[in-house]
Amino acid sequence: MKGLSYDWFGLHEWLDTSLYDINPIYFNGIWEIGYSYWTVATIIIFICYRYLRIRHIAAEQQLNSMGELMASLIVAFSLLWCAVVTIENIEITFLSWTHLPNIVGSENPSLKPETLPASAPAVSVMLASLFWSYVSKKMRNYLIFYSVFGCFLSIVSVSSWPAEIVFGIIVGVFSARFGQWYIKFGKRYVGS
């Protein structure tokens, strides 16, 4: 099972060696800036700024949509961040060098390896899922590209296994759907 989930029967090692050879240095910069937790914070600041600029002249429906998006973004990101950090800390706790230090070749492994789930796919899929109903059909193609490119950069930068990317996508979709559900729940039961 480990060969399938973490190495895809040798495919991941082949992808690592071939893609790492063609990996331009700016891909890592794009990956670290465009798909980090700070991307979500920047979007939240932009929505707040836009809201403050148009609050006196905007239609009520536009303000409600912005408020819904902002609230669901905060709830979804909070759940995503807690899930990723909690699972990473649990996984790092049980890595082999903590329990069997004589078996692992390196005495000082990196302190924060990328673990399950991968955060870049989780953030990109969460953002795409949240913005999906608020954008035009043309912009949806850009959201799909943003998500796929985030997954691709995780593989090219050799920081995530395929299983970590798949699990990151699942966490991102679940976080977005939970954020949207929570806002609808709050409006329906608490707001009435």
Image (cartoon, helix red, strand yellow):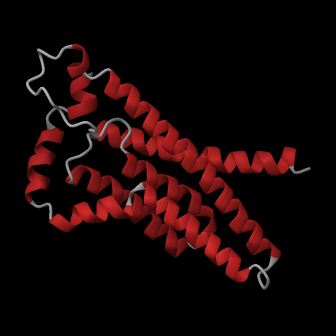
The relative height of residue 122 versus residue 55 in the rendered view (above or below) is above
Residue visible at 16% across and 65% down in the picture: 25
The relative height of residue 153 versus residue 78 in the rendered view (above or below) is below
Quadrant in the rendering for residue 185: top right
Residue visible at 64% across and 70% down in the picture: 48
Residue sitting at the far right: 192
Tell me the quadrant of the picture where the N terminus can be found: top left
Quadrant in the rendering for residue 5: top left
Q: Is residue 96 visible?
A: yes
Report x, y in % for residue 130.
Answer: 58, 57
Q: Is residue 174 visible?
A: no
Foreground pick, 47 / 101:
101
Residue visible at 72% across and 67% down in the picture: 65
Query: In the image, is 42 to the left or to the right of 146?
Result: right
Report x, y in % for residue 103.
Answer: 11, 16
Report x, y in % for residue 81.
Answer: 49, 44
The relative height of residue 163 versus residue 36 in the rendered view (above or below) is above
Report x, y in % for residue 12.
Answer: 18, 40
